[in-house]
Image: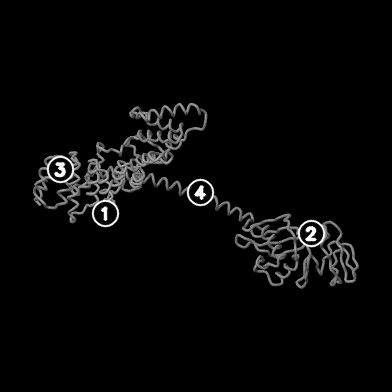
Amino acid sequence: MNQQAFEAGKAAYRQGDVLGAMEALSQAKQPGEVSGSVDHLLGNCLMKLGRYAEAAACYGDALQDASYGNAGALACNRGRALLAAGKPQEAIASLTMATKDTSYPTPYKVQIALGNAYLKVGNARDAGVAFRNAAIDESNPDPSSALRSLGSCFMQMGRAVDAVEAYRTALDFSTPQADQNAIYADLGLAYVAANRMSEAVDAFSHATADGSYTLSTEANVAYEAAQRAAMHVKGGNPSETDQFLAAAGYGTGSYDPLDPLGESGEFMPSPEDTGFFSVSEKDLVEQDKRNRRMRRKHRHTGRKIFIFLLLLLLIAGGVCGYGYYSGYGWPMQEDIVQQLFTEKSSGGDVEALLDETLTEDAKRQIKNVLPSSTSSVKVTGVDRTMTETTVFCTATLQAGGEQSYEVHLLRDGISWKVASVSAVYPSQGGVTPVLGADSETEDGVVDEIIDAEEGALTSDATEAEVTAEGTEGTEAEAVADDGSTTTEGTVAE
C-alpha cells in the first residue's frame, strides 16, 4: 500500500474534499491488492457522491481483508449502499451479516437500515421486529425514530391499537430538540384507524398548533373526518390525549427514518464507522447530555414505582399490626373453636388445637368437657385482647338440646391455641362449673356439680348423672341409679 497516498486521501476526506480524497485513495494500493482501510474510506467517498453501487462494491472489497476487521461497520455500510441503489434483497443479506458482529458498537444503525430494507420488499412484520430492536438498543440516542417506524409497521399490518402505543412511546422518548409534530400527525391517523375520534382530533391539533407543520393530504382528510365524528359525540367523556401525553411534557418534532433516497443522511456512513476519525469533543458533550437526560427519566420512573410499592408495603404492614394488636389472627378464634368441636365429634386430633404448655391432666379435662357429638356450633360472643381471647358458644347436640361453653384461647404466633374449655349452665346464674382432674363426662354428664343457688357441694352425688341435654331454659332432670328423677337444683339420693 502507498502509505503517502493513503495519508493524503485521509487528509482530503477530513477537509471535505471528497474528489481529492478519491483521487489520492485510488493511488494508495496496487491493482489486485486487498486493503480494508483504503476500500473502506473509498466507499465512504462514493456514498457521499451518491454513487451507491460503486460504494457497495468498495465495501465488499474491504470485507475481503480479514486482517482489517470492522466487519459490522463494513457490512452495515454495504447494506445501506445496496438499499440506496435499489437492491433491497441484497441489502437484507448484507445487513443480516452485520447483526452477527457482536463487537459492532452501534447495532441500532444496522437494525434501522434492516427495517427500511424489509419495508422496501413489503415485509412489514420483520421490519417491525428490526425497528423494535433498534428502539430498545441502549446505545441508540434517539429511540423515538425507531418507535415511530414501528408504529408505521403496525399501521401497515392493520394493528391500529398497537400503533397508538408505539407513537405514544415515541413521544415519550423524543428529545426537546426534535420536532414532534410529525409523530402527533401519525398518532392522529392511528387514532382514526382505531375509531377513537376525539383523541384523533387532539393529536392532529397538537401537530398543527404552532403552524410550522402541514398535514399530508391523507392526514388532513382524516382530521376533517375526525372533527365531524367528534361533533356527534360532543358532551361525552374527555379525551385521553392531553391527560396521557401532555402531562408527560411532550414537545414538538419531525424525523423520517423511512427515507429510501438517503436525503435525510440516513444512508450516509457515520464518522465513527470509518475507523480513522475520532468524534469531536463537542459531539461527545452533546451525546453525554442526551444520555444523562434519558437516564434521569428512567430513574425518575423507577423511583416512583419503588415509592408506590413501599407505600403499599407500609399500609399492609400497618393493617396487619393493627389487627394483631386488636386480637385478630389466622385462623380466627371462631374458626379454632368450630374446628375444636368438629375434631371431637369426628374423633380427630383435638390435642393439635390445644396449647402446648398444658399438662396432660388439663388436656384430658378439656377433652372430657367437650361433647362426644355435635350437629353444629354457634359462636355467641368473643372477648378479644392481643394475647388472650374468650369465645362464648352454644353447641347443638346430636341427641337433641343445646349446651353453652366458654373457650379460653392463648396467642400462638399469628394463630391461637385452646387453653381451657368450660361448660356453662343456665341454672347456675352464669357461674361456670369447675371439673376435678379425675372427673369424666360424656355428652354433658358430670360427676360433681357446684350448686350455684344453694352454695353447697353435694358430695353424695358421685354416682348420680345430671343430664344437661334439652332445650335451654327448661327444667333439667337428674337421673339416679334407681331411675328416679329430681328437678333442677336438687340431687337424687
Q: Earlier in the sequence, mark 2 or mark 3?
A: 3
Q: CA distance from mark 2 to mark 3?
A: 105 Å
Q: Nearer the viewer's eye, disc 3 or disc 4?
A: 3
Label placed on residue 402: 2
Check the image and report above or below for 392 versus 256.
below
User: Label 4 near label 1: C-beta < 8 Å?
Assistant: no
Rendering coords of residue 482 (x, y %): 90, 71
Q: Nearer the viewer's eye, disc 1 or disc 4?
A: 1
Residue at mark 1: 103
Q: CA distance from mark 1 to mark 4?
A: 43 Å
Q: Is residue 483 visible?
A: yes
Point 66% across, 57% down: residue? 385
Rendering coords of residue 133 (x, y %): 34, 47
Secondary structure type for disc 1: loop
Residue at mark 4: 311
Point 81% across, 70% down: residue? 447
The amino acid marked with disc number 4 is Leu
Q: CA distance from mark 2 to mark 1?
A: 84 Å
Left or right: residue 9 versus residue 280 is left
